[in-house]
DNA sequence: TTGTAGGCGTTATCAT
DNA sequence: ATGATAACGCCTACAA
């Protein structure tokens, strides 16, 4: 019955409602001010009958606005990413903006492709979990005054806002928790798929500072940055030292899992044989044996802020600024320390 | 230095290269056939110098194609969803298609909004993890011959392909594993945020069938569908029965966590006090105490197939068909049973 | 209060 | 081999 051979345009509606295209356009854009009630009703009826759906593509072309932003996550597999995305989405929904989510899979080339694609599709701005190797690309964007916000990592060279965890504080919270339980030989393992990732560096640096501040010795053998696959190997070396660490801080969720794998393989007991704290709260923290003490990131607030900054930047029209917003981590004290 | 006050269009390139817009367009679309080498080089140079980026929006408007599909997941928090999305993305990348990911948050209204949005943005098709309450909406889409593929759940009324787990088999695998370990009093808990979700129904039905086939009694008290928050409560009731179950199948990852929470709270031992199997493999399965036996879904294959079906549907132009593709689950035998 | 005309940036058709 | 011209569907002056 419904022969949808041709797409229905604003002209069809105009014809059916016996008004001009402009009037229909006014109607669609809620500019009812000088519009006769009758006209309004006729248009509404026509839209209904024809099941007319406005074409955003045409609208974007004309208005040079898409009311859509792009979000590029470094790796969608991290719970952290999906939580942030959810929160960005919430904020955007409330502002009638849409989001497009892309997964760079920790690959700078993919990231570049996505950035190009998003711009070609006229996204009004981008929120990106950057892979610090595309610095020149980011610089280009900011030079062109393209709205850009970083999440999780900052890129010092680039004039854009960043949403970051207070990573030093996160490490310090963990160190202090270890110390309060009487541990003095504490280590940290982070992963390092990327070259120059600021959270990793900051967490290690915060770790050192916290030890020093508490007059504890920093033992270099207890500090490792390795690929996820090598975590158990490095930990093995560490535990075979004459003086093995008593406590380990896991730099993120994936490292935590590897540490727990090692502990299980070697039939160690937490926290007696090795105390553990993980940065990033994980789904199983409270049901594990023992329950895992974690340092949680306020992902909702972080995603919210990222979206807020970007949309203000887009609407307000001011320039990209290089300001870093630090969020405070929370210690979730459980039983692994 | 780079005054990007005006966006650079194909006309600018044409002017600079001293050719017409049409020629540049040819070039952009790789139709070099009748194009002089010189011209080609001049155009390439002009594009380079001007840093010209084609506008996909204008292209879409003209071609009525966006080379983009939409993916609406029921809830991005499930690992299952992100794995499928990754796999869809891989397939699409290889076919030069883009994807837009949307998160319906198990909310039919949100789902509807997203479907409307995606269509307005001229997505060429949609892959959706459906919330079976928008049946009429799906029907409309198929009536208009709009390419549509379902994942995880099927909607019997609608003519579209579905990618499904062989849920009955999944339940049967678990039941047989329980039986092989000598358990005869076995139960199942699934969750039910939605009204009429086919995986849940099929898993329960497969569970019943498998018990019957093995001449075991089906005890209704051992079969529950409840909200996630009520899992521990229901399990409590179940375990207080005169004859409590010896083994429980968790309908998905979230239910599994709740069951493990209950076990922990009540200081039970797995599998002695209660054997457990979970549908959906979880990140912590192999490091838990004990290791959790799970039924894994072949998410890569499922996402791949979903994308393949949709893109063939788009390119091939044939009609939507109602065919369900069932994928075989795998038992990952560990120690919780 | 509503209509007319032109253009957003691209591609397609048809000349040349 | 390349160019002129007319769409694609919508919005926005400006005119009426």
Image (spheres, coloured by chain):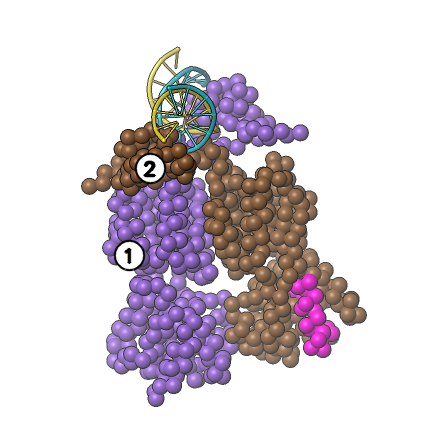
Chain colours: A brown, B purple, C yellow, D cyan
Q: Which residues are magenta?
A: A169-189
Name the spot of residue B139 as percent of width and height, x first.
Answer: 27, 50
- Answer whether residue B332 is visible to the viewer in this image: no
Q: Nearer the viewer, mark 2 or mark 1?
A: 2
**Where residue B167 is drawn, which disc sits there?**
none
Viewer-proximal residue, A138 or A126? A126
Q: Is residue A182 rendered magenta in the image?
A: yes
- Say which residue appears at 28% left-offset and 43% top-offset: B145
- Asked if marks 2 and 1 touch (Cβ < 8 Å), the reply is no
**Where residue A37 is drawn, which disc sits there?**
2
Q: Chain of mark 2?
A: A
Label 1 residue SS: loop
- Say which residue appears at 54% left-offset and 66% top-offset: A282
Work out which quarter of the rendered image holds the C terminus of chain A and state it.
bottom right
Q: Chain of mark 1?
A: B
* Residue found farthest to the bottom: B242
A25 displayed left or right of A81: left
A189 displayed left or right of B172: right
| Circle 1 residue | B155
Viewer-proximal residue, A123 or A237? A123
Residue A22 position (above or below residue A72)? above
Name the spot of residue A208 as percent of width and height, x first.
Answer: 74, 64
């Amino acid at each position: 019955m419904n022969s949808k051979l041709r797409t229905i345009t604003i002209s069809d509606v105009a014809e059916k409602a016996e008004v001009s295209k402009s009037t229909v356009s006014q109607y669609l854009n809620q500019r009812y001010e000088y519009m006769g009630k009758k006209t309004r009703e006729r248009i509404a009826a026509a839209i209904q009958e024809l099941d007319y759906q406005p074409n955003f593509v045409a609208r974007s072309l004309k208005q040079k606005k898409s009311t859509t932003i792009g979000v590029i996550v470094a790796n969608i597999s991290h719970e952290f990413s999906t939580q942030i995305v959810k929160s960005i989405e919430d904020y955007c929904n409330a502002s009638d903006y849409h989001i497009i989510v892309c997964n760079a899979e920790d690959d700078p080339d993919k990231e570049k492709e996505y950035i190009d694609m998003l711009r070609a599709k006229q996204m009004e701005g981008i929120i990106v979990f950057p892979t610090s190797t595309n610095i020149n690309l980011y610089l280009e964007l900011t030079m062109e005054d393209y709205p850009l916000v970083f999440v999780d990592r900052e890129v010092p060279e680039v004039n854009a806002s960043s949403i970051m965890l207070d990573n030093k504080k996160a490490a310090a919270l963990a160190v202090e928790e270890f110390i309060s339980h009487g541990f003095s030989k504490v280590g940290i393992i982070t992963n390092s798929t990327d070259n120059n990732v600021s959270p990793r560096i900051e967490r290690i640096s915060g770790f050192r500072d916290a030890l020093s501040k508490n007059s504890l010795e920093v033992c270099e053998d207890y500090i490792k940055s390795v690929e996820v696959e090598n975590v158990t190997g490095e930990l093995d070396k560490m535990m075979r030292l004459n003086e093995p660490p008593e406590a380990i801080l896991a730099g993120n969720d994936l490292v935590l899992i590897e540490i727990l794998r090692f502990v299980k393989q070697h039939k160690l007991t937490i926290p007696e044989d090795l105390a553990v704290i993980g940065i990033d709260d994980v789904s199983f923290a409270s049901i594990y044996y023992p329950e895992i003490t974690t340092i949680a990131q306020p992902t909702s607030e972080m995603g919210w802020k990222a979206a807020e900054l970007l949309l203000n930047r887009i609407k307000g029209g001011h320039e990209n600024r290089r300001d870093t917003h630090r969020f405070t981590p929370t210690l979730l004290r459980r039983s692994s320390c």
